[in-house]
Image (tube, helix red, strand yellow):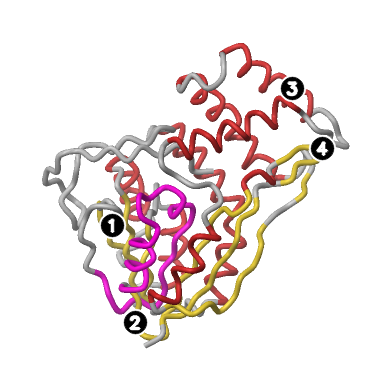
């Protein structure tokens, strides 16, 4: 769950090994520290199967050229590189120097020479990419200043007949627990309010879909991605891992008190010990669209 992004731009300065001029470390409100990288790694493990499935249905194979918009620490990027192989190409775009450094080291350790990392701000910087077979974007449109600009950039990066694959939130309030918890419900409400206060939109898909056709993208498929899971299910860790960092951030934003944050975590700990408890995950919509030549 990639939340609370700060769109604070810093002065640019040259730095290697990335192909774009590097900036001072970009500030994501949840941070770009190693603990956050670990959380994002867990998140990717949960989402890896539906991602690979979407790419396969969109036609990615050996030798394909893929661009990853907003790659973070590069977990999906490395999976894409393994799929396209040495004869393919993956270009990954991210603002955070620390995330990119981590991703580059992982790519080097795996001998994935087909990956190129680029530090760029999807809102502000020129990104001259074209003729890619597939563009991948997950939980980015909700945070950029202009979703329309993002969609246009995704379209511009593709060859005729190339595919765009997006995973974005539509009904974030669907994140609920059974039995109902008022403290948990308030946490979700405050996350959404904080997101919007920073200029984001948690329910972004209904704004994205009308932007596709004007950008030359025709919808191939739409699919809801939502689960109902118990505490013993591996996927439970994805939203559960956000609860601690998210509640701490809400305290920093003065949206909840430290005492309420403790109450949220205490109530959730009780819920996790209930073998009959269930969690409904936030609704994500998978969009696959084709560039019309």
The residue carrying mark 2 is: 159
Nearest the viewer among 234 and 224 is: 224
The single residue placed furthest to the top in the displayed view is: 259
Disc 3 from disc 1: Cα separation? 42 Å
Which quadrant would residue 92 be assigned to in this image?
A: bottom left
**Is 182 left, or right, of 65 in this rendering?**
right
The residue carrying mark 3 is: 267
Residue at 53% from the left image edge and 47% from the top image edge: 202
Q: Position of residue 196 (x, y in %)?
A: 48, 40
Which tag, 3 or 4, sits closer to the chain's start? 4
In which quadrant of the rendered image does the N terminus lie?
top right
The residue carrying mark 1 is: 117
Disc 1 from disc 2: Cα separation? 20 Å
Disc 2 from disc 4: Cα separation? 46 Å
The single residue placed furthest to the bottom in the displayed view is: 293
Which tag, 2 or 3, sits closer to the chain's start? 2
Labels 1, 4: front one:
4
What kind of element bears circle 1?
A: strand
The residue carrying mark 4 is: 178
Which tag, 3 or 1, sits closer to the chain's start? 1
Nearest the viewer among 64 and 242 is: 242
Which quadrant would residue 19 be assigned to in this image?
A: bottom left
What kind of element bears circle 3?
A: helix
What kind of element bears circle 4?
A: strand
Q: Is residue 82 magenta?
A: no
Which tag, 2 or 4, sits closer to the chain's start? 2
Crowd tier of the residue under label 2, counting other residues whose Cα lies within 10 Å: few below 14, some 14–19, many 20 or above: some
Which tag, 1 or 4, sits closer to the chain's start? 1
Q: Which residues are magenta?
A: 129-156
């Amino acid at each position: 769950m990639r939340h609370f992004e700060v769109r604070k731009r810093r002065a640019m300065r040259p730095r290697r090994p990335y192909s774009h001029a590097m900036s001072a470390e970009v500030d994501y409100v949840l941070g770009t520290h190693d603990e956050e990288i670990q959380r994002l790694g867990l998140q990717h493990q949960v989402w890896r199967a539906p991602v690979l499935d979407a790419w396969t249905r969109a036609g990615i194979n050996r030798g394909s050229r893929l661009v990853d918009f907003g790659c973070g620490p590069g977990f999906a990027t490395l999976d894409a590189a393994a799929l396209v192989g040495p004869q393919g190409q993956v270009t990954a775009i991210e603002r955070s120097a620390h995330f990119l450094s981590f991703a580059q080291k992982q790519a080097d350790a795996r001998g994935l020479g087909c990956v190129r990392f680029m530090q760029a701000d999807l809102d502000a910087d020129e990104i001259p990419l074209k003729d890619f077979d597939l563009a991948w974007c997950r939980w980015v449109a909700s945070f950029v200043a202009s979703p329309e600009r993002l969609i246009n950039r995704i379209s511009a990066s593709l060859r005729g007949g190339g595919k765009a694959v997006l995973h974005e939130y539509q009904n974030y309030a669907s994140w609920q627990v059974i039995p109902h918890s008022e403290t948990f419900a308030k946490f979700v409400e405050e996350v959404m309010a904080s997101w919007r206060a920073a200029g984001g939109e948690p329910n972004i898909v209904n704004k994205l879909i009308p932007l596709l056709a004007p950008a030359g993208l025709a919808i191939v498929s739409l699919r809801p991605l939502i689960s109902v899971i118990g505490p013993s299910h591996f996927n439970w860790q994805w939203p559960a891992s956000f609860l601690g960092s998210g509640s701490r951030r809400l305290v920093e934003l003065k949206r909840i008190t430290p005492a309420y944050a403790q109450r949220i975590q205490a109530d959730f700990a009780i819920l996790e010990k209930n073998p009959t408890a269930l969690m409904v995950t936030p609704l994500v919509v998978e969009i696959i669209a084709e560039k019309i030549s």
